[in-house]
Amino acid sequence: MRTTSLFILTFFSIVSFTPEKKFYCACCAEKGDYAVYSTRFDKEKTALLQEMTFTPAANLYMTNAGFDGMKGLNSIKKSYEAWEMSDTATSSVFFTSKNSLTAKSWKFDFKTADAKTGTLNLLLPLKIENFKADIHDSQAGEVILYKEMRFKGTVQSGTGFFSGGLQKPATYFLVLQGRGNNCDNAEDFKTWRLEITGSNASYTFWGTLNINS
């Protein structure tokens, strides 16, 4: 009888003092998170990108140097500068764009306000670089990371107003920017930036992203 009581007491002691298992959350972000890593450009990433829409308005990144600070877009310089000086410049856009993703390339079609067109064909990279960081601006509670999906590769070809400045080799750097946790969702990414670099090409476009309905 005494042995039985001792066993029951010992059993309850073990149960009472066993540490509680910590809940694990694969997607949760933590304070101080910082990561740069590469992932394969696979079907899962393609499906994620196909959930996003690049909004039509495309902006040309420009410093105070204007067209003197870039190369490869001289054919649209006069019309762009004339548009900048017009009354409609504050309420309209000079460039509109659309893009299509295939198994091997990403095509960006641009059109200017005066109907000039240009197309960039970008070869898809084998890997995507991912960047995620806690920039310490989250309110109390859940940590929201700043994140980027970075695509670096070769410009296969450029037509229209891009053709004059695109001589091989030329490269591109496309970045999708957003906020979220450690798992990537289409709705996390809000803006894009596309930089083209070559011996006679140096210019950047940027715009916003929406989610396909």
Image: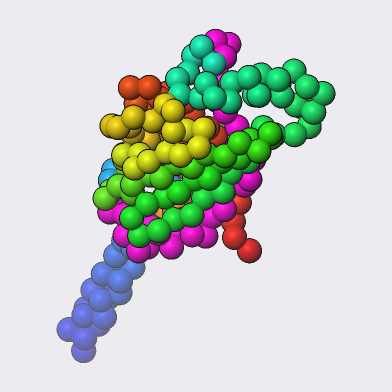
The answer to whether residue 139 shows anywhere in this view is no
Residue at 57% x, 14% y: name it: 66
Question: Whole-percent x and y of residue 207?
Answer: 58, 38
Q: Is residue 203 above or below residue 212?
A: above
The question of residue 59 being in magenta is answered with yes
**Vertical placement of 132 versus 1: above or below?**
above
Tell whether position 139 is magenta: no
Q: How is the image coloured?
A: rainbow
Residue at horizontal 21 percent and vertical 80 percent from the top? 7
Q: Is residue 110 visible?
A: yes
> Looking at the image, which residue is at 45% across and 49% down?
107
On screen, 167 above or below 9?
above
Q: Nearer the viewer, residue 164 or 148?
A: 164
| Residue 84 relative to residue 22: left or right | right
Q: Residue 167, how many percent across, how many down? A: 34, 29
Q: Seen in the image, is 71 located left or right of residue 90?
A: left
Horizontal side of residue 48 vs 84, given as left or right? left
Residue nearest the observer in this picture, 35 or 96: 96
Location of residue 165 by image quarter:
top left
Residue sitting at 46 percent across and 39 percent down?
A: 159
- On the image, the x and y values in percent for residue 202 come to 42, 23
Give the quarter of the figure containing the C terminus.
bottom right
Nearest the camera: 31 or 76?
A: 76
- Magenta residue span: 39-66
